[in-house]
Amino acid sequence: MTASDEHDAGSLIERDASGRMKRDRSERRPRTWRTGLWWKALLGVLVLGLVTVGVYAFTLNQRLNDIERVDEGQVLPDYDGRPEAVSDGPINVLLLGSDTREKGTSILASSGSRSDAIMIANISGDRQHVSIMSVMRDSYVDIPGYGTDKVNAAFAYGGVPLLVQTLEQLIGQRIDHVVGVDFEGFKGLTEAVGGVTLNNQIPFTSSPPGNTTFEQGEITITDGNKALQYVRERKAFDDGDYQRVRNQQAFLKGLVGRILSKETLSNPVTIQQLVGSLGGYVAMDSGLDNATLATLGAQLSGVRSSDLHMFTLPSTGTGMEGGQSVVYVDEAALADVQQAFANDTVAQYEPPAS
């Protein structure tokens, strides 16, 4: 080191009374009491945030526990030739809606109940799309062990397991889970999200005692009782159940869109109210435990209402069988539906024009 270098280095070093070197204080970063408080405040905010998230997650988990869970063996069938489960592939969920459940009875476990809405929700293997196919409750199909009858009769003959087996036979694929919804739950759901906006195809007035008029076009339903009138009504339409199914699809799409909106997803209070409103009105098989729901929710986090595809199992019209009115399944179109389920292309399937 040169003398010049030693001089330059010496300008940065001084010695204490004992001769030991110490660094010039001017080189130290000033640490004021404000800096210390800033870090303490930041740490406090982080801790408070973690505690809030923890409490929120705990209470949300508690609310999920209020949803009825039914043992898989009570709602999913076990029979020779049942379609195999596909790991990491598409998921098929049977959705059952009822407005005739007796108070105090299980939504899913009662074999004598009648289902007023039958839908199969297909979640694509890449978790980017959700498709919902409605099945008319009067669809004339083969019921294993009972011959040909209305699909709704399978519920009465053998409860949910026979209905699942009938639908698995219909689409040629396994149904992985079952979810039952009491239509009364639509009231709480509608109010929890602050109302549902939908496109109403046909203006109508609901049956007494509701007598509510729903105009044609885009409408917003904020009252839970009116939401229930909307999804239940069928007598006001010339084609009865056909239009009721279309209205249920329109309402469901509007509800999903509202749930997936930024306003809902960013509001923990709204989410808790939403989940809380399900208690007592929703039941699902035990395979849909909280951990599975959380995982599935994370996988579907990118799905929006525009990714929701809805259609009805194609039919060729109505007729009479044994004194009862039935809906005939379009067998030619059914082959295309089965292929779409088999190829994980349900989101791209378009039913033939009616």
Image: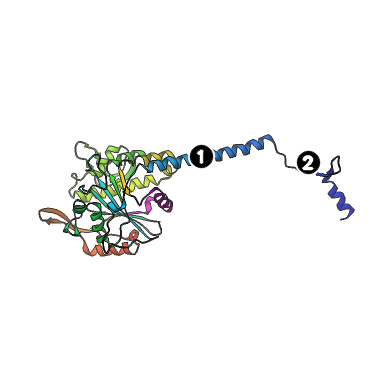
Estimate the x, y position of residue 70 in percent, counting from the top left. 31, 48
**Viewer can see residue 193:** no
Query: Are the residues at dot 1 and dot 2 in contact (C-beta closer than 8 Å)?
Result: no
Image coordinates of residue 68 in percent, x first then y, are 32, 44
Q: Can the viewer see residue 206?
A: yes
**Numbered disc 1: secondary structure:** helix
Q: Where is residue 75 in the image (x, y as percent from the top left)?
A: 28, 52
For the residue carrying disc 2, how many other residues have a C-alpha within 10 Å: few (<14), some (14-19), or many (20+)?
A: few
Camera-side residue of 42 and 180: 180
Range shown magenta:
286-309
Q: In which quarter of the image is residue 322?
A: bottom left
Point 87% across, 49% down: residue: 7
Q: Which residue lies furthest to the right in this view?
A: 3
Quadrant where the N terminus sits is: bottom right
Q: Quadrant of residue 331?
A: bottom left
Q: Number of callouts in the render?
A: 2
Residue density around tag 1, few if under 14, some if 14–19, many if 20 or more, within 10 Å? few
Q: Is residue 17 magenta?
A: no
Q: Does the segment drawn in magenta span residue 294?
A: yes
Q: What amino acid does circle 1 point to?
A: Val
Element under disc 2 = helix
**Cα distance between the residues tagged 1 and 2:** 40 Å
Looking at the image, residue 236 sits to the left or right of residue 174; the answer is left
The residue wearing badge 1 is 51
Q: Mark 2 points at which residue?
A: 25
- Quadrant holding the C terminus: bottom left
Q: Is residue 26 above or below residue 82?
A: above
Residue 249 coordinates in the image, percent (x, y): 29, 49
Hey, what amino acid is under mark 2? Arg
